[in-house]
Image: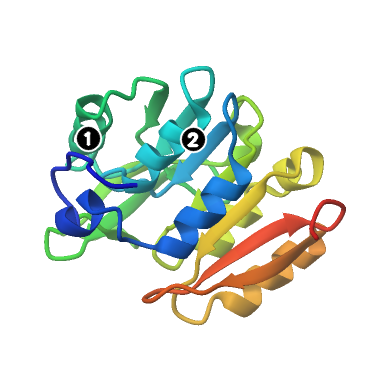
Amino acid sequence: MRGLLFVGGETAGYSLGASEPAVQRAMEAHLKPGDVFYDIGANVGFLSLLGAKLVGPKGHVYCFEPLPSITPLLARNLDQNGFFNYDIIEAAVSDHCGTAYLATDRGEARATLTPNTASTIAVSLVTLDELDLPRAALIKIDVEGTETHVLSGMTRVMREQQPTLIIEIHDGQRSPVEAILSETGYRTTLLNDDGMPHLLGQPQATAP
């Protein structure tokens, strides 16, 4: 997806549409006009924009981004590219609801959940199982190493709604992620991209 206007993040790669090509192809294969897309860990919105384009004006994108310094950039990027079929949920997705503490990585648009320290900010925690949102055809998860927490908080959604999943894998998380997906009736395929590995998760009943 080329020719986008961006502020923040990997601006050149985003504008050229060159970031995460395998993830882009998977999204194009699993989203159609009128669908709903969840972007968990939306950051400044590169994949939110692609999702908004693919689902069209009759579809919808739910962008989950906990960093209050990032959400204005996310909204600006969506708006300035002509996408208004979205909602931003300023929260981290996890395995329980409540409050957690986020430590930013040297002021960049990434963060990790940590114990409460003076250098962190408090953010809201939500689970997909406890949110009342329309069924997603596709859910992208990029949460800097807390993938299993997100999945543990959405097992009902996976079993009952069976969305397709794209999960960025961090720090040895592949095995525990695949274990949760297997337990909830999913099979996985590794997406071949440079950089961080991604898993495509599909319900056994619909996977090829």
Note whether 156 is above or below 173 in the view shown. Answer: above
Q: Nearer the viewer, residue 207 or 2?
A: 2
Comparing 134 with 146, the one in front is: 134
What whole-number distance in Å separates the C-alpha atoms at marks 2 and 1?
16 Å
The outermost residue toward the bottom is: 172
Packing grade of label 1 (10 A; few <14, some 14-19, many >=20) is many
Q: In front: 102, or 30?
A: 30
Q: Nearer the viewer, residue 61 or 123?
A: 61
Q: Is residue 152 left or right of residue 1?
A: right
Residue 54: which numbered mark, if any? 2
Secondary structure at badge 2 equals helix
Q: Is residue 159 left or right of residue 43?
A: right
Name which of mark 2 and mark 1 comes first in the sequence.
2
Relative height, residue 67 to residue 12 (above, below): above
Count of picture labels: 2
**What residue do we see at 80% from left, 64% from top?**
183
| Residue 208, picture quadrant | bottom right
Q: Nearer the viewer, mark 2 or mark 1?
A: 2
Residue depicted at x 31% and y 53% = 101
The residue labelled by disc 1 is 77
Quadrant of residue 202 within the rendered picture? bottom right
Q: Position of residue 53 (x, y in %)?
A: 42, 33
Residue 118 in view here: no
Q: Is residue 176 left or right of residue 123?
A: right
Q: What crowding class fits label 2: few (fewer than 14 Cα within 10 Å), some (14-19), or many (20 or more)?
A: many
* Farthest right residue in view: 205
- Image position, residue 154 (x, y; %): 65, 46
Report x, y in % for residue 35.
60, 29
Kind of residue sitting beneath label 1: Asn
Q: Taking the image as drawn, is residue 43 in sight?
A: yes
Q: Amino acid at mark 2?
A: Leu
Visual colour scheme: rainbow
